């Protein structure tokens, strides 16, 4: 089921006996679990009865024993099963025939006084498995896999409509870039904004820059901007700062390479008549990233951009093969950039 539909159903006090939550988006998982607990508290006059089971330490039979128990203190028991992976393709937990039969039997006829929640942190499952099919069919199966850029931006806009503070368009874009469009990180930062704004202060672009730490992805974005703008001194300083912060050169280069790949993809699709929105859908990235790529990707002639990308791809291969000194490869790129500067004069 769609996450928002499941959440709305929960808010309407429509409790299901078994939930299967699949995906690594921690914020959505925590929000759903807390909403479920709140609803049980509102519906029950007794004491809250919650049991958590870690599947890395206990078995599915332990889970079913807990799920089949009745509470003496409340109308509902909540049993939360963490670290469940037996429905994934790379499962570390193997169910015996007896365990699988017992689980399938429970899914088919669950205890109506227990709310059983299976938490699978993987973003994909093996849909061929009998247990997976049963959970997808007979439990409330909720997908919280990591959202793409557009979905994260839309979720943020919807949240801000009811937030106790306002963010300008520029502040929103800065927040997205600094958190690399990671929803859980974004929601953590919004908690900071709410505390900051409680004193009557406005959340401006400068406030976002002050409160939200930069990620390696946002730093590499700034590095990319310096490169395509032929700002060799600035690019050198950013790169040296990243190395001083113990960032791995191979990882930095891979991120830089992906940025230039985006520039080239956008240039090609733009040349074919694609609009920003169409390019975003085609490449599955947020339109704002496409807009920035269109702006920055034009700073260099296409032939120079392609030549630089090919050189970076060659360097990427050499670095991964352990050829040369990995920390110095970036300066070779800057040397090639300097050639472009000289030629452009």
Image (tube, grey):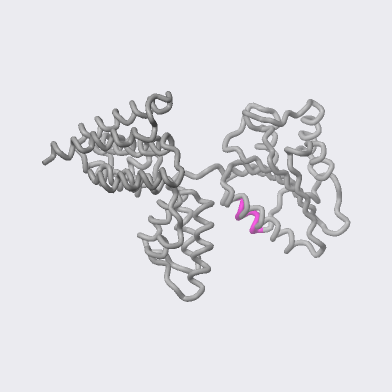
In the image, residue 124 sits, relative to residue 53, either above or below, namely above
Report the predominant secondary structure element of the magenta stretch: helix
Q: Is residue 191 magenta?
A: no
In the image, residue 36 sits, relative to residue 59, either above or below, namely below
Which of the 4 image quarters holds residue 83?
top right
In the image, residue 14 sits, relative to residue 325, either above or below, namely below
Tell me if residue 91 can be seen: yes
Quadrant into which the N terminus falls: top right
- The residue under the point 63% across, 54% down is 9
Nearer to me, 302 or 14? 302
- The residue under the point 81% across, 51% down is 113
Residue 324 in the figure: left or right of residue 113: left
In the image, residue 9 sits, relative to residue 262, either above or below, namely below
Residue found at the far bottom of this picture: 200
Residue 213, given in percent of the width and then of the height, sits at: 45, 55
Which of the 4 image quarters holds residue 145?
top right
Q: Which residues are magenta?
A: 6-12
Quadrant into which the C terminus falls: top left
Residue 218, given in percent of the width and then of the height, sits at: 40, 48
Q: Is residue 8 magenta?
A: yes
Residue 194 in the figure: left or right of residue 30: left
Residue 31 in the figure: left or right of residue 158: right
- The residue under the point 28% across, 39% down is 274
Which of the 4 image quarters holds residue 306?
top left
Residue 27, given in percent of the width and then of the height, sits at: 57, 52
- The residue under the point 65% across, 58% down is 12
């Amino acid at each position: 089921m769609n996450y928002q539909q499941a959440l709305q159903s929960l808010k309407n006090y429509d409790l299901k006996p078994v939930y299967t939550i699949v995906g690594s988006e921690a914020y959505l998982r925590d929000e759903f679990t807390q909403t479920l607990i709140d609803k049980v508290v509102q519906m029950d006059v007794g004491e809250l009865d919650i049991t958590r089971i870690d599947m890395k330490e206990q078995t599915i039979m332990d889970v079913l024993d807990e799920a089949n128990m009745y509470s003496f203190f409340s109308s509902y028991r909540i049993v939360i099963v963490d670290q469940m992976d037996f429905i994934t393709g790379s499962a570390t937990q193997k169910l015996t025939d007896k365990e699988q039969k017992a689980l399938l039997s429970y899914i088919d006829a669950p205890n109506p006084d227990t709310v059983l929640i299976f938490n699978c942190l993987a973003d994909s499952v093996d849909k061929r498995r009998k247990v997976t099919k049963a959970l997808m069919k007979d439990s409330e199966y909720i997908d919280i896999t990591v959202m793409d850029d557009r979905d994260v931006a839309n979720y943020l806009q919807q949240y801000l409509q009811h937030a106790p503070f306002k963010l300008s368009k520029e502040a929103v874009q800065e927040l997205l870039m600094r958190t690399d469009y990671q929803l859980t990180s974004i929601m953590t930062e919004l908690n900071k904004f709410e505390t900051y704004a409680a004193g009557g202060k406005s959340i401006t672009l400068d406030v976002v820059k002050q409160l939200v730490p930069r990620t390696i992805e946002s730093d590499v974005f700034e590095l990319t901007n310096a490169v395509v703008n032929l700002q060799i001194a600035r690019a050198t300083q950013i790169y040296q700062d990243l190395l001083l912060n113990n960032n791995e050169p191979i990882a930095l280069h891979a991120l830089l390479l992906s940025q230039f790949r985006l520039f080239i993809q956008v240039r090609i699709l733009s040349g074919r008549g694609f609009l920003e929105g169409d390019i975003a859908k085609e490449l599955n990235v947020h339109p704002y990233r496409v807009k920035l790529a269109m702006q920055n990707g034009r700073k260099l002639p296409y032939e120079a951009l392609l030549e630089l990308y090919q050189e970076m791809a060659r360097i990427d291969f050499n670095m991964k093969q352990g050829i040369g000194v990995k920390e110095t490869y970036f300066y070779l790129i800057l040397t090639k950039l300097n050639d472009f500067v000289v030629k452009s004069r």
